[in-house]
Amino acid sequence: MEGNTGALSTYWQVDKSLSQSLSSLLDEGLWTDVTFTFNTDKSVVQIKGHRIILAARSPVFEAMFFRQMESNEVAIVDASPESFKLFLRCLYTDTIDLDEDSLIEVVKLAHQYQVGYLLNRYSGKLAMLIRKENVCKLLNLAVFYDLKDLKDMACDFIDGHVLEILESPGFMEVSVESMKVILSGDTFYVDELKLFQKCMEWAEKKCKQQELEPLYQNKRKLLGDGFFFLRLPTLSLADYTEHIVKTNILSVEESLEIYKYKCLPSQLENTLLSGNDLSNSTLPRKQKVNTILWPKNSSKVEFLCPNDVYLEGITMEDIVEENAATENYFRDISLDGKFVIKDIDKTAIFQAGYSSKLPDFIPLRERIFLKGRKTPYLITIATRCFASCNVSVFLQFMNVQHLLLQKWPYFKNPPFIKGILYQNVSNR
């Protein structure tokens, strides 16, 4: 038996995992039956593969090799040899780690060849790499290839960093469709006049690229449907007159409709929103994150919620003054509690424990979804707070006792809860 094991060890397949064995087939070009060719500037590059493996991973390759083609050679004209080789390696092994640029190329090829597993896996990895410098590029990718999860995460990031994104070089490079997605968001919270001006700057750059005169009419055409997601009716009358009307970007009829809305909003709002005359939204944009302020000395609050939101957690006031005495006095502080949305029978639990002071924010164990409606939600809260103290410090600073009694009477329903943090749900 030992002799047989020794003999087997001379073969390359022994002790390799499935992905390692398939990788060896690709790297060594063993028993290949298809060749991909690339015409580069310098020469023709060839990459060899295995029909059965490729067909097992991609319906496109299956149709190509077993239903349509008789040739053993395939010319690739829309990918570089380097990116295609990485894509094949991913198909063969599922285990390769890629940098950001390589991930983008593999995602494009995974979409082209309908490899859903790789598409989901690597677009998810891209979502984890989102930052200010690349979020617009990744949004372009997500919109073009219809990658919903990546698009949603890119939009959430943009909503949370609006001013930085507007001033970034990436904003000037977004596609028309991506611009439409950005502008459509109710939670893209920014001064509308500034947003209009940045969009005109974006459109002027597109005019230069297409050798068009940078007229406002041309800029509007390049924005396409995205123009109608600018919230021009929400501008003040002075800003609208000074900065919008004078550009002649609107027709006389469109401009008149907005003037009527500014003077008689209740009569014309439905007309504007219907798109019969002008579909620029009359709804102001909302901050992505906001707070339900908690009234002092009360265990309940009414929350008017006109749009869908998620309740995220509790925000706290500073409960310990910033000096050496109070910082060293408190230890083993804990807070637990719940709030109840009575008319929909929802309960949210929160709890925190820290060695010196409570945090500024305590998340809920499970966030709560509230549907937008015209009548307010009634929210009640109940909390308990416990703390031990450093006796030696307490004896040195007797005034801390007064602070303790003032800030935490009875340690029940303490008055240092500032409010409930919530996120407006994006309408994209």
Image (spheres, rainbow, N blue to C red):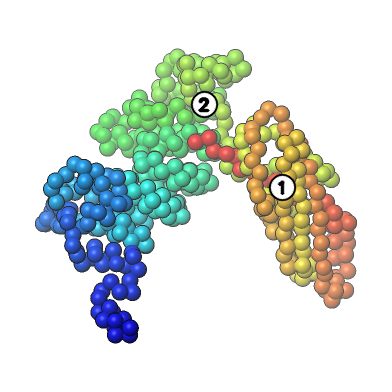
Disc 1 packing (10 Å; few <14; some 14–19; many ≥20): some
Residue 153, compared with residue 250, is above or below; it is below
Q: Quadrant of the N terminus?
A: bottom left
Residue 154 appears left or right of 82: right
Q: Element under label 1? A: strand
Identified at 77% across, 68% down, the residue is 331
Residue 257, compared with residue 8, is above or below; it is above
Kind of residue sitting beneath label 2: Ser
Q: Nearer the viewer, residue 150 or 278?
A: 150
Name the mark on residue 348.
Answer: 1
**Number of marks drawn:** 2
Kind of residue sitting beneath label 1: Ala
Identified at 60% across, 39% down, the residue is 424
Answer yes or no: is residue 226 visible: yes
Name the mark on residue 281.
Answer: 2
Identified at 75% across, 46% down, the residue is 339
Q: Position of residue 96 (x, y in %)?
A: 35, 62
